[in-house]
Amino acid sequence: MIEERFDAIVVGAGMAGNAAALTMANRGMKVLQLERGEYSGSKNVQGAILYADMLEKLIPDFRQDAPLERHLVEQRFWLMDDRSHVGLHYRSEDFNEERPNRYTIIRAQFDKWLSSKVREAGVTVLFETTATELARDSHGRVVGVHTDRLDGEIRADIVVLAEGVNGVLGTRAGLRERPKPDKVALAVKEMHFLPRETIEARFNIKGDEGVVIEAAGTISRGMTGMGFIYANKECVSLGIGCLVADFRRTAHTPYGLLDRFKHHPSVAPLIEGSEVKEYAAHLIPEGGYKAIPKLYGEGWVVVGDAAQLNNAIHREGSNLAMTSGRIAAEAICALKSRGLPMTAEHLALYKRLLDRSFVVKDLKKHRDMPRLLHTNSHNFFLTYPQLICRAMQNYVRVDGTPKAEKQKTTVKSFVNARSWTGLFSDAVRFARAWR
Ligand code: FAD
């Protein structure tokens, strides 16, 4: 056994782990953080949009030195068929504000920076060290971890599991189940490098302004999934992800989808002539509220993606990870300052605080959406996008056909595809799941 004892051990140095470690160290706790990667960010994949509000709660002056790419002034949503897209774009000069609300980032650089703040706060961080097993006492309480690098166990009052969606420490210990194929998406992503001026001209931006595009439709071949295109300073992040269960059910491959997405006539001109320098694949928890496992127990809490805290409907994950990490840490510090042991009874405070936050409230709001989309993926990701794109073309094409006739053709195409009952039931179920 390693003699040095810590107040807390944090497993993982992603968004959730760094937030938890930083918060506890800032409040005077002695923290050890373990990360299996070579450095913080080396194993992490994200689009990536950073939500400033959640980071500000950890590091109020982060804008001074954080490696940020572009602040977002425009959000585009595209509904695509194979040759076109219908878009909803929102752009506002209000986003050119002193403290912008959202930024694009590159995780490898950002996490390295965040980890430097964690170390400055006094956390002992061991990279290239995998926590292999939880250490328990004779009553089964978690009292520390075993690692692949140090002999014996390292002890602490509490272990914070921030090991990401695929973390096996908690699943192996029976604290939660491995994510089921219909509750987890596999996403692939590429970084396309282009000169800065080319990106600004193609996305209609200047200076450090940024644009992000979220895309759904036939690009996912009837599977539950979405694509994204994010403008960074000198590269464009582009990716697509679908539920693992859907990949299993069909013959489609993630790389095949990405290739089609890149060659779509709406996408290809944005990345034409680019040099691809990075390719990454990663899982995303998409089960929502109903997939959240037990969040705490005797001597442990789980945060971030490992706890399935990911809002796939709004494409938010890192902010939920940072917030759950911070809230768990605040609960732990509150117990410690009152001299209370880290028992399940006391750690229930973490869940109570999390339930009151946007993290659980937002996931609860959309609790029926993951299942609705998965069980109706053919309609929502194939039939409707095709119908809507065709209706739009019918609407804008001027060919001498009377408008009333065009309208009739469009309505008929929807009814033929789904029937009146089908249309009504889809609308009601969607509205209910969104409420
Ligand atoms: P992770 O970032 O996965 O960190 C877990 C860490 O734990 C890793 O560094 C890993 O190496 C380490 N680890 C695991 N097991 C062990 C062990 N046994 N011992 C030691 N270390 C261990 N979210 C957004 O907010 N905006 C976006 O634009 C966005 N886009 C995304 C695009 C893609 C393609 C993907 C895959 C995800 C995206 N997300 C986005 C989601 C976001 O990336 C995650 O929600 C977030 O990274 C979760 O943080 P985390 O700290 O919980 O997990």
Image: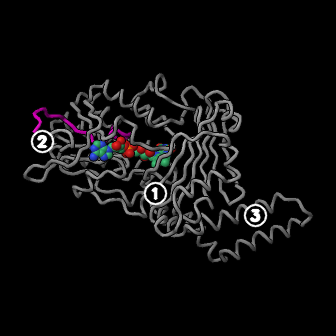
Judge whether residue 326 can be spotted in this image: no
Residue occupied by mark 3: 391
- Is 236 in front, or is 228? 236
Residue beneath disc 2:
152
> Closer to the camera: disc 1 or disc 3?
1
Quick one: label 3 or label 2, which is nearer the N terminus? 2
Residue pointed to by mark 1: 185
Mark 1 or mark 3: whose residue is earlier in sequence? 1
Amino acid of disc 3 = Ala
**Does ligand 1 reach within 8 Å of label 1's beta carbon?**
yes
Q: Position of residue 425 (x, y in %)?
A: 59, 73
Splitting the image into 4 quarters, where does residue 147 fall? top left
Marks 2/1 in contact by CB < 8 Å: the verdict is: no
**Residue ID at (68%, 43%):** 272
Spatial CA distance of label 3 from label 2 is 66 Å
The residue range painted magenta reads 1-17
